């Protein structure tokens, strides 16, 4: 699975975004270590705080189906520009793929890659709870 293919899948997932409030649509495609891909989109709510981001939708779908090991996640947004994952999503990515890669795509500038550790330095994890 190339990064380009994963970005294209994230674009497909963005088509399912439910974002009537912000009108900012986000799509994510999460590649598990077993080769499966889980798609996610943002799902907003009239009670704004109940909104779920695209990245977390993808991770929670996978984990709820017994898949917990991931390699990389591609994220795209309707702005066409890079969409940096929010703080809560960074924390969730750190939980399940601390050594994984985040791929962001901009229609004009192309793909950019970050490690999860780079996006959440000194993140709080299980080891900190000992
Ligand atoms: N959003 C995501 O889906 N992922 C992020 O990491 C940033 C924000 C969504 C949530 C909300 O539906 C919209 O973008 C505006 O914040």
Image (spheres, grey):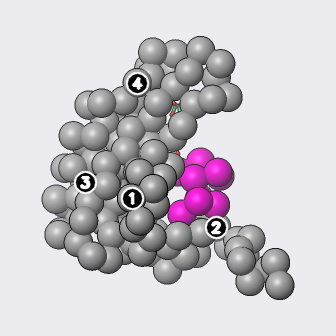
Q: Is residue 112 visible?
A: no
Pointer 1 and pointer 4: residues touching (CB < 8 Å)? no
Residue tagged 3: 7
Q: Is residue 68 visible?
A: yes
Residue 68 lies in quadrant: bottom left
Q: Nearer the viewer, mark 2 or mark 4?
A: 4
Q: Is residue 5 left or right of residue 66?
A: left
Query: Real-space Cα distance between discs 2 and 1?
Result: 26 Å
Residue 112 or residue 30, whichever sits in front: 30
Outermost residue to the right:
130
Disc 4 secondary structure class: loop
Q: Which quadrant does the N terminus fall into?
A: bottom left
Residue tagged 2: 120
Residue tagged 1: 65
Q: Which quadrant does the C terminus fall into?
A: bottom right
Q: Is residue 77 magenta?
A: no
> Is ligand 1 within 8 Å of the beta carbon of the residue shown at mark 4?
no
Which mark is first along the chain, 4 or 2? 4
Disc 1: CA contacts within 10 A as few (<14), some (14-19) or many (>=20): few
Give, as a single range, the part of the protein colored magenta: 79-93
Residue 95 lies in quadrant: bottom right
Q: In the rendered picture of this protein, how many numbered marks are placed on residues? A: 4
Query: Real-space Cα distance between discs 3 and 4?
Result: 19 Å
Q: Looking at the image, which residue is at 54% across and 63% down? A: 93
Q: Looking at the image, which residue is at 44% across and 22% down? A: 19
> Is ligand 1 within 8 Å of the beta carbon of the residue shown at mark 1?
no
Q: Is residue 16 left or right of residue 1?
A: right
Q: Nearer the viewer, mark 3 or mark 4?
A: 4
Q: Nearer the viewer, mark 2 or mark 1?
A: 1
Q: Residue 24: image x %, image y %?
A: 44, 27
């Amino acid at each position: 699975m190339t990064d380009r293919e994963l970005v294209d899948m994230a674009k497909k997932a963005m088509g399912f975004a439910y974002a009537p409030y912000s009108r900012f649509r986000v799509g994510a495609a999460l590649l598990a270590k077993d080769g499966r891909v889980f798609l996610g989109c943002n799902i907003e709510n009239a009670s704004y705080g109940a909104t779920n981001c695209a990245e977390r939708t993808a991770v929670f779908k996978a984990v709820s189906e017994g898949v917990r090991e991931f390699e990389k996640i591609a994220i795209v947004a309707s702005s066409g520009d890079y969409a940096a994952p929010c703080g809560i999503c960074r924390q969730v990515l750190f939980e399940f793929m601390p050594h994984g890669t985040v791929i962001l795509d901009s229609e004009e500038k192309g793909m950019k890659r970050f490690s999860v550790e780079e996006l959440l330095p000194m993140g709080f994890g299980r080891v900190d709870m000992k």
